[in-house]
Image (tube, grey):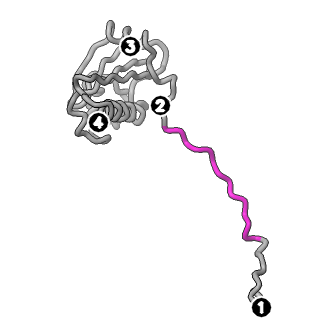
Amino acid sequence: MTGTGAHVPDTQAHATVVVSPPVRYCLPRSARLTSPQYRAVFDAGRSIAGRYIVIWSKPAEGTARRVGVVTSKRALHTAVERNRARRLMREAFRLNRHVLRDGVDLILIARARIVDAGGRAVAEDFLAVCRRVGLCRKESESC
């Protein structure tokens, strides 16, 4: 600043800011079941129920861990409830898929009480059911 009140620009104040690309937290398409794969899991798979979800599982070819999500109008009456349940179940799978064995196809079915559950409770229920079915890796200590 000078005595006259004029502003003298600082030449080093204009630094270049590098912005990294946004992180995508969505479930990739390669981790989702297609319509014919749903039928294969229901026909050849087995199911076990937890507090908030029912899991149908079937061994799959390759190392992919894929998931399908089902919500019914009978259990979850409004579209808002069904959409929230789908988000909670997909997120539980996404956060814990590294714990699952390679080569498994899962279908997650929402139960009515998922409406009152939070994300952490659904994720814990998902892991508990996976442990009972034997879907967790042996070397994984977190499952």
Q: Report which residue position mark 3 lands on.
A: 38
Q: Report which residue position mark 1 lands on.
A: 4
Quadrant, the N terminus? bottom right
> In terms of sequence position, does the residue under pointer 1 or pointer 2 come before the other?
1
Between tags 1 and 3, which lies in front?
1
Highlighted range, magenta: 12-25
Residue 4 belongs to the span the image colors magenta: no
Q: Is residue 43 above or below residue 140?
A: above
Q: Majority secondary structure of the magenta segment? A: loop
Q: Quadrant of residue 121?
A: top left
Q: Report which residue position mark 2 lands on.
A: 27
Q: Residue at x 32, y 35 (%)?
A: 80
At label 4, counting other C-alpha atoms closer than 10 Å, the crowd grade (few under 14, some 14-19, many 20 or more) is many
Amino acid on which the number 3 mark rests in the picture: Tyr
Are dots 4 and 2 in contact, CB under 8 Å?
Answer: no
At label 3, counting other C-alpha atoms closer than 10 Å, the crowd grade (few under 14, some 14-19, many 20 or more) is some
Q: Position of residue 30 (x, y in %)?
A: 51, 22
Amino acid on which the number 2 mark rests in the picture: Leu
Residue at the limit of the structure toward the bottom, as seen here? 3
What distance separates the C-alpha of mark 4 from that of mark 1?
66 Å
Indicate left or right for 75 with 69 as reference.
Answer: left
Q: Position of residue 3 (x, y in %)?
A: 76, 92
Q: Report which residue position mark 4 lands on.
A: 122
Q: Secondary structure at mark 2?
A: loop
Q: Position of residue 77 (x, y in %)?
A: 25, 28
Q: Which mark is residue 75?
A: none
